[in-house]
Image (cartoon, rainbow, N blue to C red):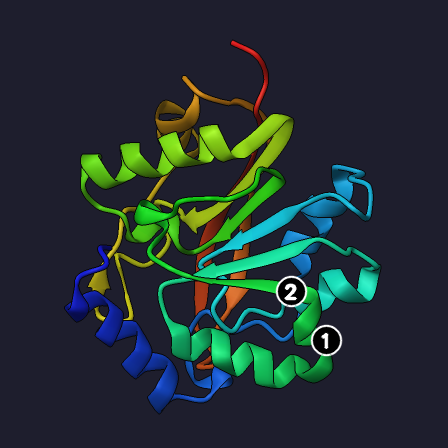
Amino acid sequence: MSTDNTSTQHWNTIYQSKNENEVSWYQEYPATSIDLILKLKLPLSAPIIDIGGGESHLADALLDLGYTNISVLDISEKALEKSKNRLGEKSKLVKWIVTDVTEFKPTEKYDLWHDRAAFHFLITEEHIETYISIAKKTINLNGFLIIGTFSENGPVKCSGLDIKQYTNESLNDKFGNSFNQIYFQYSDHSTPFGTTQNFLFCTFKNEAT
């Protein structure tokens, strides 16, 4: 995934041409992500960023739970516009960031970096290493990173693009030099089309190394 015009246009076209429940990754409520976040027992003022948040309802759920410092990043301005419209006045409580994550230049640090279904679109080692480097520098010491990717039993493509599947071992190989894993689980996602996608969710901690 890069910020060339083709990639940006691809995602803007997807979000402009489809309703939120017409894409495979749609969740009315992000139950798995919320359960994993609540396990961390973060203070409600903790800075949280949702990477590739698009039209995700994670920000809505976090606001409803009382979290007050939420950022959402996505390559597609159209996706973020639709989320803002859905949230209405509440959208002013969220920081919206339009950029490719591999070119993200953060202006603050976060206690939680959450990513459901963005990382697996990075298929070159250069982009993967850049992503991990940005995350390492951006997450506070003793902060957390939650990654949700397609597992080895999940799809090999999404939205017409190639993705990288991961096992717990292979995801640890990528992040293990920078973070310590504290939890993982496999989770089935039921798409709006009646199909099932198997995800791997891993929680890592940014501890001193």
**Residue at the location (63% across, 75% down)?**
28
In the image, taking residue 153 as reference, residue 207 lies left or right, namely right
Residue 124 lies in what quarter of the image?
top left
Q: Position of residue 121 (x, y in %)?
A: 29, 53
Q: Position of residue 103 (x, y in %)?
A: 31, 48
Farthest-out residue, front: 107
Compared to residue 20, the image places residue 183 above or below, namely: above
**Residue at the location (67% across, 45% down)?**
47
Q: Residues within 10 Å of mark 2 (few under 14, many from 20)?
A: some
Element on which disc 2 rests: strand
Q: Which residue is mark 1?
A: 90
> Of 41 and 185, which appears nearest the observer?
41
Q: Residues within 10 Å of mark 1 (few under 14, many from 20)?
A: few
Element on which disc 1 rests: helix
Distance from the alpha carbon under mark 2 to that under mark 1: 7 Å
Indicate the amino acid at tag 1. Lys
Q: Which residue is mark 2?
A: 94
**Tags 2 and 1 touching, CB below 8 Å:** yes
**Residue at the location (37% across, 50% down)?**
101
Residue 105 lies in what quarter of the image?
top left
> Of 111 and 93, which appears nearest the observer?
93
Q: Quarter holding the N terminus?
A: bottom left
> Of 60 and 117, which appears nearest the observer?
60
Q: Position of residue 203 (x, y in %)?
A: 58, 35
Q: Position of residue 104 (x, y in %)?
A: 38, 48
**Residue at the location (21% across, 46% down)?**
123
Indicate the amino acid at tag 2. Val
